[in-house]
Amino acid sequence: MVEPLMLIPVACVVLLTLGVVFARNPITSAFCLIGVMLTLAIIYAMIGAHFIAALQAIVYAGAIMVLFVFSIMLLNMNETKSEIALRSKRTWAAVAVFVTLLGLVARAIWEWSLEERLPTAGPWTLERIRDIGGNSLAVSASLFSEFYIQFELISLLLLVAIAGALVLAKRKVD
Amino acid sequence: MDTGTLLHLLSAYLFCMGLLALMLRRNSIVMLMGIELMLNAVNLSFITFARELSHLSGQVQVFFIITVAAAESAVGLSILVNVYRNFGTIKTDQTVSLRG
């Protein structure tokens, strides 16, 4: 059974996502997206992924969305009418793709959830994570032992991204 | 229906809405937001699977995805600022030539 408390953030995510896609003004979309990310952080915390919940709130809702809001301010867009043209071929195609994809995936998930599944309990049950001292400790232990090469490569990627963003956004002197 | 199924369905919905934003909108910034929605959908799926299978690898992958998303949006938004300088707009139906 679904925990009743879980339905509140799920409903919030569903409504705020509509705001992201259909809002006329980009700044409304950005604020709805901040809401989506914070609500997802709440969901992560509710299902026990505390470290990722903190990361989602700090990096996604903090850093990335600040970038978005600053770019919108910088680009100075004033929308007067909605850019979604109703009854155009493009809109119909987009809606058809949306309905088909969502229907197929939802049906697959639903049938998969009805199947009898073998209990595939991995090593990290909630009790064991609680015993060794919490989710953050368990995730960071895994990050620095099993995934340390990927961790170093990701830091290299961030360095390249900083350099790329600086070069791209720099004002040309000539 | 248990909580895991609900979250998988939410993840599918988020992914499709991100795709819809990418297909419907002409404003490049909102299209980038659609990509962020799709990345968030995948993150939610990873974490739900990690909980169902009692594994931590899914959560570590989400850590990596968040980092890549930060890099992607930093580079993408600075490209958009450049596009705006050259064309005076970031609507994808008006920026049609590769020449700056």
Image (cartoon, rainbow, N blue to C red):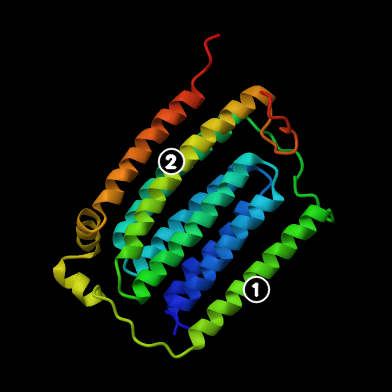
Q: What residue sits right under mark 2 in the picture?
A: B71
Q: Above or below — where is A132 with respect to B71?
A: below
Q: What residue sits right under mark 1 in the picture?
A: A103
Q: Nearer the viewer, residue B64 or A12?
A: B64
Q: Position of residue A146 (x, y in %)?
A: 23, 59
Q: Residue at x 50, y 26 (%)?
A: A168
Q: Above or below — where is B59 with respect to A173?
A: below
The 10 Å Cα crowd at callout 1, few under 14, some 14 to 19, many 20 or more, is some
Q: Is residue B39 left or right of residue A55?
A: right
The image shows a total of numbered marks equal to 2
Q: Assign a secondary structure to mark 2.
A: helix
Q: Which amino acid is tagged 2?
A: Ala
The 10 Å Cα crowd at callout 2, few under 14, some 14 to 19, many 20 or more, is many
Q: Position of residue B100 (x, y in %)?
A: 66, 23
| Residue situated furthest front in the rendering | A149
Q: Nearer the viewer, residue A82 or A114?
A: A114
Q: Which amino acid is tagged 1?
A: Gly
Residue A28 visible in rendering: no
Q: Residue at x 62, y 56 (%)?
A: B19
Q: Position of residue B55 (x, y in %)?
A: 30, 70
Q: Position of residue A80 (x, y in %)?
A: 75, 38
Q: Is residue A51 left or right of residue B76?
A: left
Where, by quadrant of the figure, is residue A94 drawn?
bottom right
What is the spatial separation of the Cα atoms under label 2 and label 1, in whole angstroms? 32 Å
Q: Chain of mark 2?
A: B
Where, by quadrant of the figure, is residue B52 drawn?
bottom left
| Residue situated furthest bottom in the rendering | A116
Q: Residue at x 19, y 59 (%)?
A: A141
Residue B58 visible in rendering: yes
Q: Nearer the viewer, residue A168 or A72?
A: A168
Q: Assign a secondary structure to mark 1.
A: helix
